[in-house]
Amino acid sequence: MLFNLRTDYFLNIMKNVKVSPNGYMALVSPGGSVIYSKATSSGNEIRPEGIDFLTNHIGYNGSFNVKNIAGQQMIVMFNTLGSNQWALAVIVPEDEMIQKEGQIKYISLSIIALWE
């Protein structure tokens, strides 16, 4: 029950974070379940291989490039939460990432600090 309360609280925080015009956050369980911070525009979701990569790298922190369903190049930065081994990912179109790099790192680190 405590985990559910913490997850709800965390998701409320995620929903209020504006990453970029077309960027979003995702919480990925070790089993591959995905909770998005906002409804993504059609085709903006990352392809299944991106989710697979995150799931296979639970326990690590890093970044990688993957295309979204529409074929646009996306950058995914992720951190594994030590308390539950879920991956917190910030997903941003590559062209927006160049403009928002510093802001996204700050947001991601702030969310992780609140969670742990």
Image (cartoon, rainbow, N blue to C red):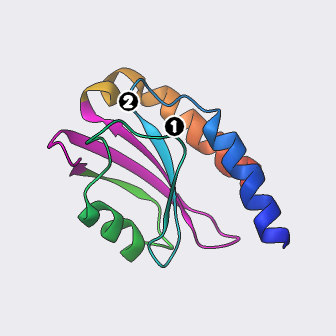
Residue at left offset 25%, top offset 42%:
43
Residue range (magenta): 66-94
Q: Quadrant of residue 42?
A: top left
Name the residue tied to disc 2.
Answer: 22
Magenta stretch containing residue 55, yes or no? no
What is the three-letter code of the residue carrying label 2?
Asn
The x, y position of residue 67, in whole percent, is 20, 48
Q: Confirm whether residue 107 shows in the render.
A: yes
Among all residues in the image, which is located at the extreme left?
71
Circle 1 residues within 10 Å: few <14, some 14–19, many ≥20: few
Q: Quadrant of the C terminus?
A: bottom right
Q: Residue at x 39, y 66 (%)?
A: 54
Q: Nearer the viewer, residue 51 or 83?
A: 51
Q: Residue type at mark 1?
A: Lys
Residue 96 lies, in percent from the top left, at 32, 25
**Residue 53 place in picture, x, y as percent:** 32, 68
Q: Which residue is mark 1?
A: 105
Q: Measure how far apart labels 1 and 2 are at the Cα level.
A: 16 Å
Horizontally, residue 49 falls left or right of residue 110, namely left
